[in-house]
Amino acid sequence: MKIALIIERFDIALGGAERSVSQIAEHLRSTGHEVTILASVGPAEAKGVKALCGHQTRERIPFSQYRAALETHLKQTAYDIVHSTLPYSGADLYQPRGGSYVETALRSATAYSNPLVSLFKRATGFANAKRRQYLHAERDVCSTEKVVIAALSNYVKSQFLKHYHLSEERIALTPGGVKTPLPIDPTQVERCEREILTALDADRSHTTLLLFAANNFRLKGLHDLLCAMSVFKQQISSDRLGLIVAGTGKQPPYHRLAKRLGIAKDVYFVGYTNAIENYLAMCDAAVLPTYYDPCSRFILEALSLDKPVLTTRYNGATDFYRHLRHGIILDEPYRIEPFVHGLAALSRPENRQDMAEAIRQDGLMQAVSIENHCAALIRLYNTLYNQKQKIL
């Protein structure tokens, strides 16, 4: 099958969506499909990628310009399936890697700890010109019966049912996935562990190491995590939590918060890393108390390594695991008491061991794999292709 995969920009350093599309294309090609990634911009040397508006990967091209370039290309080149991660009405299926634009704006506003700021952001969240353009395009996609919505999670599916009143038939569930097994480097794992333990002045046998990884620290709940850790330290002083923070978010406000909360010596910021798997391999649990995440790759990668996880009901990755059996699912990131109870559960070695064993027994590594994700996509591709053939 000849497949076009549409993405805004192609540069896997940009984030999870770009990396996911690259892995999808790689796996589909390995199963015999011909896949072309269509991007507004991308590196000139990238194999299997057509940059329709240039080769400056960090440049943002207006969606109207990119859409015109897409239409021109698709008139000249025939594909069996056009799979878009952008709200493009000329596609066969729309797979919003970031969920719906409406939900993104609403949940982003909720993540501000100051209620007045949150209210202001909620009121002005749709004033952003770029977001408004994509929102209009998404409404256009939802208003036509031609395009099927491919949802990464039940959370994303619920967004389109709620905000656009789509029928169940318009939405296909294509559960998110990551490339497994992760490429762990034992030497680097040992180096990371030494680095962390030295920085925290920690005894490994008496410290539970938690890993938080994100680029948007506010949206992913780092403020609430630090607050919960502070309360945990006051209530359960016999157990020590050490937090590793990875990602490119702004560190100074959180350094100050950790110091004010009395946990500065328990938190270590590693900054950007392109090998999060090595930190995952040496941590005890992965934590992401997010205000919004359609289906977190970080949580899926942790599960693929049999690591207990903690996240919220606003993360589509919770489709894959059960509360208390494989990890912790919080209703709200800002509710400190249940958050502290969750941290307490993860701080007990016997609980983590039971959770890790349950993850293995229940086959979560296969469930979160890119193979499983692509199998769902291929089933959807075949259905859509057969429907188009009947019309011809």
Image (tube, rainbow, N blue to C red):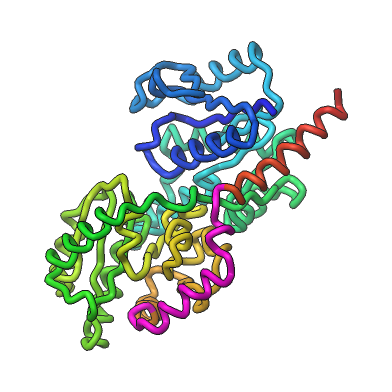
Is residue 113 visible in the rendered structure shown here? no
Query: Magenta includes 163?
Result: no
Q: Is residue 208 left or right of residue 25?
A: left
Question: What percent of the width, then of the height, locates residue 356?
Answer: 46, 73
The quarter in which the C terminus is drawn is top right
Question: What percent of the width, then of the height, locates residue 310?
Answer: 42, 69
The quarter in which the N terminus is drawn is top right
Residue situated furthest top in the rendering:
76
Residue for point 48% across, 57% down: 300
Dominant secondary structure, magenta: helix
Is residue 364 visible in the rendered structure shown here? yes
User: Vertical placement of 28 versus 264: above or below?
Assistant: above
Q: Between 115 and 348, which is closer to the camera in this rendering?
A: 348
Question: What percent of the width, then of the height, locates residue 169?
Answer: 77, 48
Q: Which residues are magenta?
A: 346-370
Query: Magenta includes 367?
Result: yes
Determine the image quadrant of residue 209.
bottom left
Residue situated furthest front in the rendering:
187
User: Vertical placement of 110 versus 3: above or below?
Assistant: below
Question: What percent of the width, then of the height, locates residue 240?
Answer: 23, 79
Q: Number of numbered discs present?
A: 0
Q: Between 225 and 390, which is closer to the camera in this rendering?
A: 390
Determine the image quadrant of residue 382.
top right
Residue for point 58% across, 59% down: 367
Q: Between 188 and 127, which is closer to the camera in this rendering?
A: 188
Residue for point 82% across, 34% down: 387
Q: Is residue 206 left or right of residue 100?
A: left
User: Vertical placement of 77 versus 254: above or below?
Assistant: above
